[in-house]
Amino acid sequence: MSRCMAMSKLMFAGALLFAGRRRGGTTAFQLYRQSSATASSAFVTASRAHHPRLPTTSVTTSSNSFPLRASLRDLLEGGNNNARSSSSTAEVVKSTPPTAPTKAAVENRIETTTLPINDNEKTPKTQPLKTSPSSSSSSNSILSISDSYDSGNGEFVSFLIADGEEDYTDVIVHVNIKPDPYTDLEQKSHFQSFSFRSTINYNSPAIRGIFRDKKSIKVKYIVDNASDASYADAWNGASIFVTKKSTPYDADSWYRTSDTTYENGVLSWTHVHELNKEDNGDSSAYFAYFPPYSYERHLGLIAQCAESEGARVFSLGQTVEGREIDCVKVGTGPRKCWIIHRQHPGESMASFYAEGLLTRLLGLNDKWDTVSEKARELFTFYIVPNMNPDGSANGYLRTNAAGSNLNREWYPSPSPPLAADGSDTSSEMYDAPTIHRSPEVYYLLKRMDESGCDAFLDIHGDEALPFNFLAGSQGMSVWGKRLESLHGAFLASYERANQDMQAKVSYDPDKPNEGMTNICSNQIAERFDCFSATLEMPFKQCWGRPAGWGPERASQLGASVLDALCYVQPHLRDDGDFWEGLLDEDAYVEPSSKY
């Protein structure tokens, strides 16, 4: 390049840097972006003057075609002098009709920088900062997204350096939630729950360059496929959890974001990542729909129970992937009470509930109380802390490893109209449970038939309703005054023991004899003619209660269930009109989903 050409580049670069000093780095970067087309055009014109053999061409809008732009970006970002000096000629292509730049093209243009392959090379290598999922861990990426841990689920899509232009954010990151295996019965792939780690890379050009003087950067996270989730409307009013701990399994470290929004089918929130450049480390954060409960923590809980006096741990059988279906037997009482948790693996609050229940029942925290002693005298408990450890470890929302929604596997049901291969199955029955598709239910139901059942709870989490609530077996043939009264008394006692529970809001009850027999609590009520219910906890904040609903309060709710069970135990198999002796406040309240 001639001396005149070099002077032109230096003058243009100097103007940008001068503007940056007067207006700040952000303005300089905006000016650089706004001026790039004009600058490139001027550079190509100047190049033709000094290189008359260059043909008449047009320059594409891709940053790969603008080494001048890339070198100016590198100038703004800092970097190796060789990189700047080596970007001396513009890449030209054959003339093509002008087209409107796509969003992807704009993002690629903004996110590209020129870096040297090594200090000895004369030709720079262009590295895109906007990465694909397969390259999200590149050393040149400003951040990386990972879900490669127990219960992780989150797929990197793209990112964009916004530099304060949108919602005062520095970086915008797009992710997707991975779907569950396809369910033959429901004929869909569920997804909603997620958990992933985001790590800032200090070695990226942007951190060393345009963000080099910042102590923190604000990142906006966007879930692109949120509108296609299983319960998309439930995103309204949701608040995503975040922790800055080095592990996602410290339940006490999680807190809710304050700016989660769901608008026009887009779920988003922001997080400020601190940049501790002196340590040359990473600034990581974990994000989740609800804090995860790891399989390792589950095994630790099981080990504690096994070592506790008065408890016996055994396996009901193995899951599809070969994990044990752990069951904890506690107590010597005459009434058999089964409590199972986490049929739907994405509902991790159910595991925290189980931990709270077992901790109190067995005194795992070295705290003994009269209620837990009484409960062990009145009941023989069979507690399954995790019905679906495969799905939990794999980060699924509703299915096991075979793609079965376990809460639809408790009894045969009509098959869907078409099988996966397109054949007509409308006249066939969907057999359930089976040892191949749903061994978790198969083995548990077999053991329940052997032991009997007088009271049953199935512990879940609900995406939409911001309440803790109980869904009863109103639609089953066994529902009558006895079960209705037990339901009412149990809930009233539960409310007295823990104000996070309430009775007025729940799913709208099924009409008489119209309940689905393949749903767990309905099948158990019908099979054993017993008090049976599904207990749901919210992903959202608990409506009408102090803020802070999360793992700790889910654990407390699990501990409090012993009070309610002890209260109704005398009436579980009472054939008399026991309801006439109950308190007025124990009366059954017909719930509604409206609030």
Image (cartoon, rainbow, N blue to C red):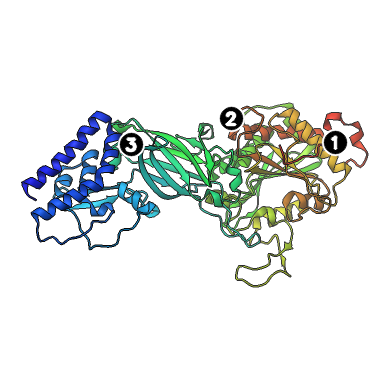
The structure residue drawn at horizontal position 78% and vertical position 52%, both measured from the top left corner, is 515
Find residue 506 and report its image quarter.
top right
Residue extending furthest toward the bottom: 423
Residue extending furthest toward the left: 3
The structure residue drawn at horizontal position 63% and vertical position 51%, both measured from the top left corner, is 325
Q: From the top left corner, tell me how far across and down residue 302 is, in percent.
A: 60, 42
Q: Which mark is residue 281?
A: 3
Q: Taking 45 as reference, is 277 above or below it?
A: above
Residue extending furthest toward the right: 576
Find residue 543 and report its image quarter.
top right
Which comes before the other along the chain, label 1 or label 2?
Answer: 2
Mark 2 burial class by Cα count in 10 Å: few <14, some 14-19, many 20+: few
Dot 1 and dot 2 residues touching (CB under 8 Å) = no
Q: Which mark is residue 548?
A: 2
Q: Would residue 121 be seen by someone viewing this image from the given angle?
A: no
Side (left or right) of 432 relative to 333: left
Q: Which amino acid lies under the numbered mark 2 shown in the image of this protein?
A: Gly
Q: Taking 511 as reference, is 289 above or below it?
A: above
